[in-house]
Amino acid sequence: MPSWSFALMALLGLASAAPAALVDPLSIAAMRARSYPGSALTVHQILTPGTNYSRQVVSYQSDGLRINALLTVPNGTPPKGGWPAIVFNHGYIPPNLYRTTERYVAYQDAFARAGFVTLKSDYRGHGTSQGTAQGGYYVPDYTVDVLNAAASLRRDPRVNPARLGMWGHSMGGHLTLRAMVIDPSIKAGVIWAGVVAPYEFLQDRWPRGPGAEVIPNQLYRRRFELIAQYGTPKQNPAFWAAVSPNSFLKDLHGPLQLHQGTNDSEVPPTFHAELERELKVAGKPYTSYTYPGDDHNLSRNLALALSRSVAFFKKYL
């Protein structure tokens, strides 16, 4: 393990947990130590184009698995250096019901029409992607998949590798935050109704369970294994801090834009508030928008939230 990983842990007061945390692949240090090569994007299906962009079902490689994704590419001549690009991280959808071309259509369309290449990863085990779906919070798999999605976009000659951002909703917000503290080349991130609080919140302050959806127990098997092995966040705060992106906010290399409806029944708005507090402590730039009475999908303010998100990426990418 690189020496900087231990030094970072020590600076964060996590040195006592270093052996356990670094052995576990979920730890931020362990995830920083591995590589994310991505691959060339392979086209599997050409879809009906959007207003000013093409749409294709593609795939890329992640941990030796074929991961499907929905790619959009603006029409016309790219700007010098290539198009700016956004990795699009969707929220929890039952993996067996997930379809590449369904859900988030209006969301992805807004960025595509604005001149961004977008890539919405299916994640492993979703739809016809290879691999097993094990959830986004207690195993590193989905984060690995989105980091390989980012790497695959950087390899594409149509994309400017220096102008890459991430958008995430709900569980995808957690993946976005985790990816940004691992990969400093992600220039900016937008998070809607994100699962972005420390693990103590996820385990003790989420009464209906992660996402408030009916989630198969096997997706959280690793949660119970980690608790059995290391204890709860209260019993072993050092371990859980070592695997939480919230402990590494000082390492963010780009700004965040946060959106949250106050009537969100799936992810508590307190998660959004806690990340705000921690970003202030870390001295990191962010913009926060709350939408009174709005729900988990910002249904009442969708056009406004999308316009703010597009403007943010235009400014920072």
Image (cartoon, grey):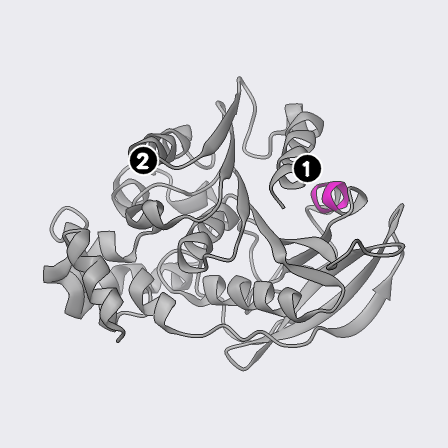
Q: Nearer the viewer, residue 242 or 184?
A: 184
- Residue 159, located in which quarter of the rendered image? bottom right
Residues rendered magenta in the picture:
107-111
Q: Is residue 258 magenta?
A: no
Mark found first going from the N terminus, 2 or 1 = 2
Pinpoint residue 242: horizontal percent, then vertical percent. Answer: 24, 57
Residue 236 visible? yes
Determine whether label 2 and label 1 are within 8 Å by CB: no
Query: Is residue 149 placed above or below 215 in the rendered structure?
Result: below
- Residue 152, located in which quarter of the rendered image? bottom right
Q: Residue at x 64, y 37 (%)?
A: 315
Pick out the residue farthest to the top: 292
For label 1, the residue is 310
**How many numbered marks, from 0 up?**
2
Q: Residue at x 26, y 76 (%)?
A: 1
For label 2, the residue is 278
Q: Nearer the viewer, residue 58 or 182?
A: 182
Q: Secondary structure at mark 2?
A: helix
Q: Residue at x 15, y 58 (%)?
A: 10
